[in-house]
Amino acid sequence: MTTREMSVAQATVEFLANQVTVDVIDGERTEVRTIPGMHGIFGHGNVAGVGQALKQAQILQPGLMPYHQGRNEQALVHQAVGYARHTRRRQTYAVTASIGPGSTNMATGAALATTNRLPALLLPSDEFATRAPDPVLQQLELPHAYDITCADLFRPISRYFDRVQRPEQLFSALLNGMRVLMDPAETGAVTVSLPQDVQAERIVVPEAFLAPREWRIRRPEPEEVDLSEAVEAIRNGQRPLIIAGGGVHYAFATEKLRALAEATGIPVSYTQAGVGTLDWDHPLCLGAIGSTGSTASNAYAQDADVIIGIGTRYEDFTTASMTAFQHPGVRFVNVNITSLDAYKMGAGVQVVADAGTTLPKLRERLESVGYRTSDQVAETVRIEKARWDAAVDESFTLRNEPLPAQTEIIGTVNEAMDDRDVVICAAGSLPGDLHKLWRVKDSHGYHVEYAFSCMGYEIAGGLGVKRAALAEVEAEGRSAQDGRDVVVMVGDGSYLMMHTELVTAVAERIKLIVVLLQNHGYASIGSLSESLGSQRFGTKYRYLEEEQRFDGAHELPIDIATNAESLGVDVIRVRPGADAVDRLHAAVAEAKARPEGDGPVLIHINSDLYLDAPDSESWWDVPVTGVSELDSTQEAFTTYSDHKSRQRLLLGDGRDDHERNH
């Protein structure tokens, strides 16, 4: 057996460089490099280990493991996640961080990756395995459990966790980590903790460990019994509804979904992760569903008797906190590669399989028995869709003064972008409004992180998407100028949380377009607070007044445009006024016209804090205190109690649930 003597870190870098993702869909084989590069920030915990290994590779084997410098470890994980989602979980980045705060900074990113079912490989550094200089700088040192370190924080939020305490453990740690990373039913954050002394230790490595290794994405077929039961359940329904989630995208099954809908006449609604599974103007597309959904989806879903969930985790926004489905005998047919999600909602039929392998079989079976929805269903869909489209059109053309409404800004940016461009968002009121209003005609055109709804994801995640978009055109042999523009829409609250990866975009001359909406507050939580009777408490950017109040008339003199300029970003300011949205359209067009390699552009526009998007005619369960001296809270509790009475506990047969709750 041929071997090489290396450091643990050197072996790690070379191993990761030689991992290959293989995906076979409808007989077509795709091979891509699983880990195209590594993000990292160096400290004393990883500079002599992983840092040395990356530098040595840069000199001796250029291209082996490209390195990207970052400004915040959490943001580096967000970049990896953004890249992973755009590549449909075929690729992700590795992230190296130093011990202590360097590693714990990654925890939010790890939880986000796991919650979104997206792969990210984290390599936190750890305390000395030998404990020779114990305690070291940034050591946690708990008196009751000395073997617990900061890296243990990742155990409950990772899909796989391991600590390499001896060099020989590296082999099984990395192999098992890759196994989970590339398993669509298990994927999420994979954490392999590397003690700072072990990183630099010698290890004898078999060449076989370092050789190119394939990881084939499993796309299981549906079992016959499940398929038959699914067809029977759908045939017995009068008003079926498909809810498409992110699993449709990850299975590359958008065309198969469209074919199923057109063959059967079953309308389609989509979750946040499922936007783009069907073009917004398709006659069977009801749009977004749930708390941030369209009135079309929610009105139809209320009386739907068969819900066909495809690749969805049924988040509470999707189910309107278990109030969306009111038919007394509603049944669920869930198609999901993950059994955890397939069994949700007391599903009558669970098809634990890949959406791409299941949808054609489902269509063929339904066609063979001549199944198609009634003319009444088609007419209901047409009427509800027209009603919602008119409401969206109106929200796009308000011409509010002196500041435009957020809906006007969304509509203007949407119109100025090309179909192939990608919009990025994550937290605040923007994701909900985008879910309702954004008109998508490309399966990659919408990227809103909403499983964790993490403030600060936008710019970092958008940078990850842009890297993937650039790699996409390079792989196709086209010019970068022919690729997708990536447009980040972010509010001032989320911008202030984490904007430092703009510096990374400047350093690498990456053309990332950021549209910054400044409304001097937290619009989403402010509106929610008002609806719950708390009067927008603590949600405005104001000077501190007497009695610990932050709701005075004077806004803070925050100049985000100048802040971005100070980071080296080119800024376009859209002045307030009657023609603000027209100038915004021109600004987006100007930013798009700039060449790749020109660096990031930030478009700054002020927006109205108080104007909301069209009502979804839905609900989200946020408890209201039942004991209060405030009239506003008492009124909110009455409304809350009314909504709560419609909440259903779906554990099996919908009819039994309905009878138990009423």
Image (cartoon, grey):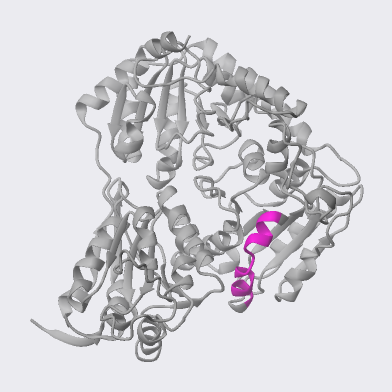
What is the tally of numbered marks visible in this picture?
0
Q: Is residue 470 visible?
A: no
Q: Residue 183: percent from the left, percent from the top?
A: 29, 52
Left or right: 586 as drawn, with respect to 488: right
Left or right: 484 as drawn, with respect to 44: right
Q: Is residue 498 magenta?
A: yes
> Could you say which is closer to the camera, residue 290 or residue 45?
45
Left or right: 127 as drawn, with respect to 108: left
Q: Residue 11: percent from the left, percent from the top?
A: 26, 80
Q: Residue 16: percent from the left, percent from the top?
A: 31, 72
Q: Is residue 227 magenta?
A: no
> Could you say which is closer to the camera, residue 387 or residue 474?
387
Q: Residue 46: percent from the left, percent from the top?
A: 40, 81
Q: Identify which residue is drawn at 69% across, 55% down.
A: 493
Left or right: 203 as drawn, with respect to 336: left
> Could you say which is closer to the camera, residue 490 or residue 514?
490
Instruction: State the extent of the magenta-drawn residues as a range.
Output: 493-506
- What is the quadrant of residue 308 in the picture? top left
Outermost residue to the bottom: 59
Outermost residue to the front: 143
631, above or below 117, in the image: above
439, above or below 62, in the image: above
> Could you say which is closer to the camera, residue 368 or residue 447?
447
644, above or below 259, in the image: above
Q: Is residue 137 visible?
A: yes
